[in-house]
Amino acid sequence: MSPVLSAGPFSAWLRAAREALRTGAGADVPCGDCTACCASSYFIHVRPGETATLDALGKDALIDAPGLPAGHKLLGHGKDGTCPKLVENRCTVYAHRPQTCRAYDCRVFAAAGILESPDKPRINARVEQWRFDYPTPRDREEHEAVRSAARFITNNAGLFPEGRIPGTPSQLAVLAMKVHGVFLEPPRVPAETARRIVEASRAP
Ligand code: SF4
């Protein structure tokens, strides 16, 4: 069995993760020598303003991002799901890696109590290793609120307007993190909870 990994105190992690999402700043993840997310068949979004990154990656590694305005690109992966910039288990463009890579934090799945999709077994192995700490009762309450949000959204998809249900596990985990405050409030009927979730998801 794989050893457990400390994911840190839950409430401190939640605040930092939400701030990273809000500002676009990078996440401070104790990855160690893990490169699972660089070898899990992700298409990595690179925004037009990331000029140093676009130069470092080179045109040949990028494709136009479908459905997004001109200038948005995707960094693809090889047949085995590995990023072309990962060589001998090291990122060869680390100083200029995309914002998407900087922001990635697989603890979000552990926070929401879910796994990534089954085609990403290395990520899921890592997710199962993370353990949060609960230095105060609030840490535990907030973690339960994030898990409750993920469960509610999954089990009540019919209560949400079209387009408001996350299409991927990572979108679900991020949404659960964002709207968890709804589950720290007194319980409501499901339709009202769904309405509050939509409201909370619109917050910056
Ligand atoms: S650019 Fe670097 S950090 Fe991003 S997926 Fe590729 S190897 Fe990993």
Image (cartoon, rainbow, N blue to C red):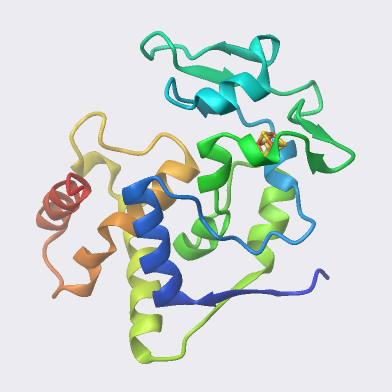
Residue at x 77%, y 25% (from the top left corner): 84
Mark yes or no: residue 132 visible: yes
Residue at x 35%, y 58% (from the top left corner): 19
Question: Which is more toward the observer, 166 or 76?
Answer: 76
Relative placement, left or right, of 160 versus 43 is left
Image: 170 above or below 96:
below
Residue 66 in the image: state x and y as whole percent: 46, 11
Residue ranking furthest to the bottom: 136
Image quadrant in which the N terminus is located = bottom right
Residue at x 24%, y 40% (from the top left corner): 158
Question: Which is more toward the observer, 102 or 127?
Answer: 102
Image: 98 above or below 201:
above
Q: Quadrant of residue 76?
A: top right
Residue 149 in the image: state x and y as whole percent: 32, 60
Residue 157 in the image: state x and y as whole percent: 29, 42
Relative placement, left or right, of 62 versus 45 is right
Residue at x 31%, y 38% (from the top left corner): 165
Quadrant in which ligand 1 is drawn = top right
Relative placement, left or right, of 125 versus 149 is right
